[in-house]
Image: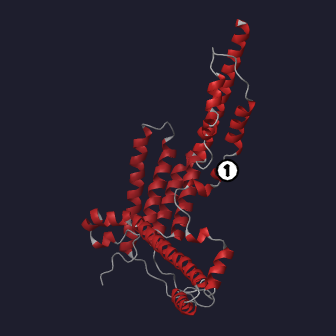
Amino acid sequence: MSRRHHRASCSGASRLRGVAAAAALAAIAHLVAPSAPSFATLAAGRAAGSAKAGVFCGGSPIVRDNSLISGMASTATATAPLSWLNPRSWSSEPPSPTERLSPREWTRMYRNLGLEEGASREKTVKATTRLRRKYADDEEALERVENANLWIMTKMMTQKEEATRKRQQANRMRELGNAPKNLFLKYIGGYLPPSVRQMFEAPSSAHFRTASSLMGIFALMGVCVPTQAMNFVGLSAVACMGLIYQRGRPEPVKDDIGNAGAVQKINYKEAASAVVITALGVLSGLGLANALSYVVDAQVTAVFCLTACATLWTLSLFMKVYGCFNTN
């Protein structure tokens, strides 16, 4: 008798573990989809029967109730809606008026006012006023008109607010993009002479591609062939001088055949400035390479090629000399 009682008690303990697992599964489903029926709702109706049956380890033999466990498992897995699989339900923001109605419903809203889709605000107001007078005695038709007018006006206000928000976001991004330039002009450019201040200019996309491709090729070849790194540094310096001197300079006038007309004379001040800027870039790259030689275990020539190309690339992007020394 005691062995049978012990066996029934162990069976009751395993059955309780199954009920607890079903309860945990139902709780998780309820957290993921709050609209699903909770486990407490299902178990409340069966709590009295479970207590009377003595579902406790060490008590009387347990009355088998397979419907309880099967009902809990099926409710935990089958009744939970799958709305959480929809990415739109992850956001706490309500859907916009445009998304609440289908295209067919929007077409019906506009037809209720006798308008085409995308009608202006003025046409909507005129059509609503006319239909209010027409259906003043017809409550059902008037309600239909007012409903359509409310939805269309809400859609227009939402679109206007969205356009304003996008415009403000674009202005913020523009201000963020101009922040480095404004900081430079405020803290550094204000203390420089006008001729030096005019040398700084943000690169265009075409100029960025040209300078980056040239300096990148020279730096890559200098790393691949360290014995010829100094030659590639010289090529990078020549390319930097050419980019700085030619930047912003107008193209020479050509005739129908393609021959250049009047040849522009070299501006020696601008040419000397391009040489000085390039020399400063090479010296900066040399100092940076010496500093990195204590940290990086690599050939000094390869490191110098990388640092020199990097400094010359930066100078060729943001520096120019054309028109910076005009006296008029």
- Residue closest to the eye, 49 or 173: 49
Q: Is residue 158 left or right of residue 180?
A: right
Secondary structure state at the residue bearing disc 1 = loop
Residue 256 in view in this figure = yes
Q: Position of residue 148 (x, y in %)?
A: 58, 80
Left or right side of 261 for 36: right
- From this view, report whether residue 280 is shown above or below residue 273: above
Instruction: Depth check: give the residue in front, 294 or 151.
Output: 151
Image point (44%, 59%), residue name: 314
| Residue 270 relative to residue 253: left or right | left
Q: Residue 88, relative to residue 145: is it above or below?
A: above
Residue 183: percent from the left, percent from the top? 32, 63
From the viewer's perspective, is residue 62 above or below residue 203? Answer: above
Residue toward you, 140 or 179:
140
Q: Is residue 63 left or right of residue 234?
A: right
Q: Can the viewer see residue 117 in this picture?
A: no
Q: What percent of the width, then of the height, locates residue 283?
A: 39, 53
Q: Where is mark 1, residue-wise?
A: 82
In terms of image quadrants, where is residue 26?
top right
Residue farthest top in this picture: 2
Q: Quadrant of the N terminus?
A: top right
